Image: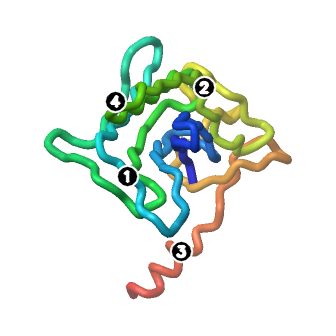
Amino acid sequence: MSQYVIKLNDDDVIINQDIDLAEAYCDVVFKVKQDGINTVNLQGLSFGFTLEKDGKVVHEFSYPPAGVHLVCSDMPYICAERVNWVTNDYYRISFWITQTGKPAITRTYDFLTPKPEQPSPACTWNNNKKQFEYPRQYPTDGKICNWDDRSKSWKPIKQYLSSMFQRRTR
């Protein structure tokens, strides 16, 4: 699960944990300290984040929405927001939390989004296209092919599904 977890600890400090970030997205999850039994007072709490790429805001989130007031919760998390990004690129994420009667808390982190898994040892990363490329172009003859690392070429695969489909439709 691709998550960026933000939570308050006993000292009301934001702790960030990036957990298996995916190359194209993650869920930013806001959590509170929870003992599993009692409710947590959320009165006057508001929080959010901005995600920047190259100095420009690409995603912004704040909670609660206008007209909504948090009171309390017995859930381990308050909310989650999905963020999409470009693989293998630099981003800055800034979190903020305010609660009535307490000083505002802000934290900023710079990070590099991960690359997808390399599909074959023969592939090389093209940073302009943000993808792995095979040493040879995929055939355009209409056949379905798989890459063969031994021969360093595309090999047509047998089309069992199409022949089974043809048998069924006769």
| Disc on res. 41 | 1
Residue at mark 1 to residue at mark 3: CA–CA distance? 58 Å
Residue 113 falls left or right of residue 72: right
Q: Is residue 89 above or below residue 32?
A: above
* Comes first in the chain, label 3 or label 2: 2
Residue designated by label 4: 60
Q: Quadrant of residue 124?
A: top right
Badge 2 or badge 1: first in the primary sequence: 1
Q: Earlier in the sequence, mark 4 or mark 2?
A: 4
| Precedes in sequence: disc 3 or disc 4 | 4
Which residue appears at 38% of the width and 15% of the height?
A: 56
Helix, strand or loop at disc 2? strand
Figure quadrant of the C terminus: bottom left
Q: CA distance from mark 3 to mark 2?
A: 44 Å
- Amino acid type assigned to the residue bearing label 3 in the image: Leu
Mark 3 in CB contact with mark 2 (< 8 angstroms): no
Question: Where 28 sits versus 168, above or below?
Answer: above
> Could you tell me the amino acid type at mark 2?
Phe
> Mark 3 or mark 1, which is nearer the start of the sequence?
1
